[in-house]
Image: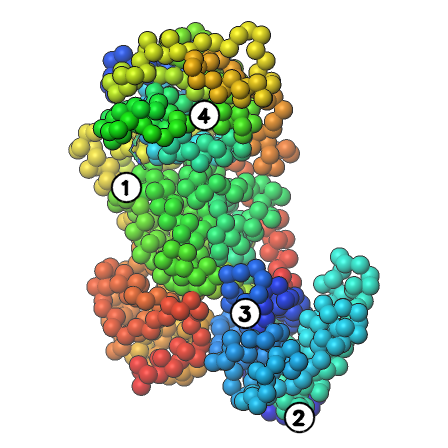
Amino acid sequence: MAKGKSVGADGVSIVLCGQAGMGIQTVEGILTGMLKLAGYNVFATKEYMSRVRGGNNSTEIRVSSRPVSAYVDRIDILVPLNKGAISHLRDRISADTVVIGEAELLGDEVSGAKFKFVETPFTKIANDLGNKIYSNVVATGTLAGLLGMKLDDICEYVKRSFSTKAADVVSNNVKAAQAGFRLAENVAVRAGIKINMSPDAGVKDQIIPSGGDSIGLGAMAGGCNFVASYPMTPSTSVLSFMAKHGRDSGIIVEQAEDEIAAINMAIGAWYSGARAMVTTSGGGFALMVEGVSLAGMLESPIVIHLGQRPAPATGLPTRTEQADIELALYAGHGEFPRIIFTPGTLEQAFYLTACAFNLADKFQMPVFILSDQYLVDSYYNTAAFDVSKVKVEKYVVKTAAGYKRYEMTPTGISPRGIPGFGDGLVCVDSDEHDAEGHITEDLGLRTRMVDKRLRKLESAKAEIVEPQLYPNCKYKNLVVCWGSTYPVVKEAIELLGKSDTSLLHYSQIYPLHPQTADYLSKAKRVVIVEGNATAQFAKLIKLHAGFDIKDRILKYSGLQFSVEEVTVALKKILK
Amino acid sequence: MDTNVFDMGDIDVAWCPGCGDYGILNVLKKVLAELDIAPEKLVMVSGIGQAAKIPHYLRTNFFNGLHGRALPPATAIKAANPSMTVIAESGDGDMYGEGGNHFIHTIRRNPGITNIVHNNMVYGLTKGQASPTSPLGFKTPVQVAGVMLEPFNPLAVAIALDAGFVARAFIGDAEKTKEILKKAITHKGYALVDIFQPCVTFNKINTWQWFKEHTYYLEDSYNPLDRSAAFKRALETDKLPLGIFYINPNKSAFEDNVGIYQQDNRPLFEREPDLNRLRMLIGKFRAAG
Ligand SMILES: Cc1ncc(C[n+]2csc(CCOP(=O)(O)OP(=O)(O)O)c2C)c(N)n1
Ligand code: SF4
Ligand SMILES: [Mg+2]
């Protein structure tokens, strides 16, 4: 390959941008698939508009010799597919960005540009093959060639990707990829770049699920067998995942008439012996709130996947945000305990979701998986989830005659029976109730019942997931974050290169880990990074750990933080 | 089975003396006893209201959930364990007002549950406001100028949605109500029984006497398999017909449609996840997309 400026020490960032319906996903799917198979580390994340056609959507694909899992602003190679794409990404394009595309399509956006533009006749090649539609695969071939993939591997993979299609479609796509591949050398020469990457032997055996897939797989590993939900971006991917694999795995998956029905179904399912989950987003969860309170009163287990997106109201349906901590924390009238997980990696998404079912069953309370659009829609290669590390723990008891559902116990946890299993009767009531589950207005008993329910939180506190400290416990500066920002802040800390700065990531924010104050007060300076406007986790920490975090890096535009953005912000604060 | 297996003994019942709810409770106990449904194999699901307190007065399993929300949990309870008999029972406000959306979609979903609605044409528990079935002109502390909204017609709605079993009863006739309920509970799939139930405290219009005078039974020759005829009869308002309006015996129930009981009829709680299948599924993610 041509000589030129070496790119790719920490990987290459490729961005595809076009209108919805233009086939960005085809390129993304084939490219990431073949790269992963060839042993490269791959990460992909998308930002898209809430429309089915048109607009400007982009996907970032990072390819690297070492693991990558965070969004960067930097674009090494841009493939704009329509007019407007370049302006859409204006702020992220630099003099080093190589833009490959067709001037005819992109118009004046490429003339006199500050980036390196290389004309690549994707459409002409496609038309020569008989249909414009092949242009996406031509582009895929070019990108794969640029990244150093072998032509045979590319053709093989393209063949596989279109294997369900007619023979001529398959052969035309292979030809398209070959033609695209032949353009690569010229692009490298003209742009003056040379990409140096080597495959990583470990990658082949890894898996490359999205956050949504990971949550779905985790639910299955946790023994989930009932899902009721109502579609709402970005939580829908978990619903479709469960629907796709549900029947074969003995899981009932139902699209309810609304979110109110969904959560009431899920609670009914737990009562009847199922392990149930709902998956929703802010507005849908708002409708579920009464059901959360019902679970509190019935002492019903319930697993709630809440995929955050910008709000209030309908907000930005397809974008990301971390502004529903307080919603999850305070949802439901009255006082009752709950657990809130905030996974930041695919691995955490899998294991914590599985764990959520056990904890919900054990403590008989709502357990939240608080994710967001960024986590749900992004994917990268990660070690295959190990099912043997997860145990489905069931806490249902066989009842005897005279069984009392709400028997008083020191831990507050009453053995949970279900109807039809044993000789007892299982009576649950949304009214305040006695030990048997019957309505009561005995106000002394009321007080004891509130105490009983709240006591369960003390038991749950014994099993709080520890926050992760990176790289070590010798720090002067501590950067705190939670949920999906983990890989971004982690890479920012690496980029910052300050040996006195560590990261503390919370994958469970409630109940808050009891050592939080210790972690924080050890640092000279504490900075929090949150994807919201009011530093909700900082407030939670203040309330529960008594520690006031003054330095805050907040973002609520609808996009995830980029690695560079966090790095710059940290530099400013930690000068 | 003896009806007294369902007796709660000496308990404090929150219903007013003379209320139609007592009759429904007594009839229901008889129906369950005659059908040999053991308390342990039954789940009563209700919402909130005077009618919705009925599970507390009957010795069995129950899920007394939220106002308007009896049908979703009832559906799930049946789906998670189809061997149970599930009855969802509440008032007209609960089922047709707050729970109206669930009423519509539960019919479409067709779970094997019996939906009993105490239709007293008023909100009893909250002291006398209009319900969706209150008659036009009905004055209440809130509807001070009288009800102006067209009364909800649950039977017509259910028939329009092709509910599998649609009936109306009047608790003034315990014997006939019992027969209707027995058929409803043995029907496979969703069954609606709307029961006229006089509220002696807050509804001075639709009294025992009023219901007696304004109802009659569908004639013996009536064919409940004829949906158009059923719809027509459901629209009658001068005098309100009682009996089984409509039966569609050809519908499969939700729990049979969910696709997990064909090979294996064990309820969900007896099952373990198939970890090998899950391992294979995880393995499939070695390839992207
Ligand atoms: C969400 C909610 N809104 C309002 C109420 C108050 N409420 C309880 S029962 C009821 C109406 C009861 O009427 P109906 O269902 O007809 O039962 P009835 O008492 O007449 O038997 C209302 C409005 C409530 N419990 N929950
Ligand atoms: S208020 Fe009406 S419906 Fe309620 S118990 Fe009294 S009479 Fe019956
Ligand atoms: Mg009523």
* Residue at image point 28% right, 37% down: A409
> By what rule are the colours in the image chosen?
rainbow
**Chain letter of the residue carrying label 3:** A
Q: Comparing marks 4 and 1, which lies closer to the viewer?
A: 4
Q: Which residue is mark 2?
A: A3
State whether discs 4 and 3 lie on one chain: no
Where residue A232 appears, x then y in whole percent?
A: 48, 52
Determine if the C-beta at disc 1 is less than 8 A from ligand 1: no
Q: Residues within 10 Å of mark 4 (few under 14, many from 20)?
A: many
Q: Which residue is mark 3?
A: A56
Q: Amino acid at mark 4?
A: Pro
Q: Residue furthest left?
A: A444
Do the CB atoms of the residues marked 3 and 2 lie less than 8 Å apart? no
Q: Residues within 10 Å of mark 1 (few under 14, many from 20)?
A: many
Quarter the N terminus of chain B occupies: top left
**Chain letter of the residue carrying label 4:** B
* Residue at image point 25% right, 70% down: A549
Vertical arrangement, residue A61 with respect to residue B258, above or below: below
* Residue at image point 28% right, 41% down: A453
**Chain letter of the residue carrying label 1:** A
Find residue A92 and name its label. Answer: none
Q: Which residue is mark 4?
A: B154
State whether discs 2 and 4 lie on one chain: no
Nearer to the camera, A16 or A22: A22
Q: Amino acid at mark 2?
A: Lys
Disc 4 and disc 1: Cα gap in Å?
Answer: 39 Å
Considering the numbered disc 1 on the image, is that residue within a helix, a strand or a loop? helix
Residue B110 in view, yes or no: yes
Disc 1 and disc 2: Cα gap in Å?
Answer: 69 Å
Nearer to the camera, A401 or B182: B182
Considering the numbered disc 3 on the image, is that residue within a helix, a strand or a loop? strand
Q: Which residue is mark 1?
A: A453
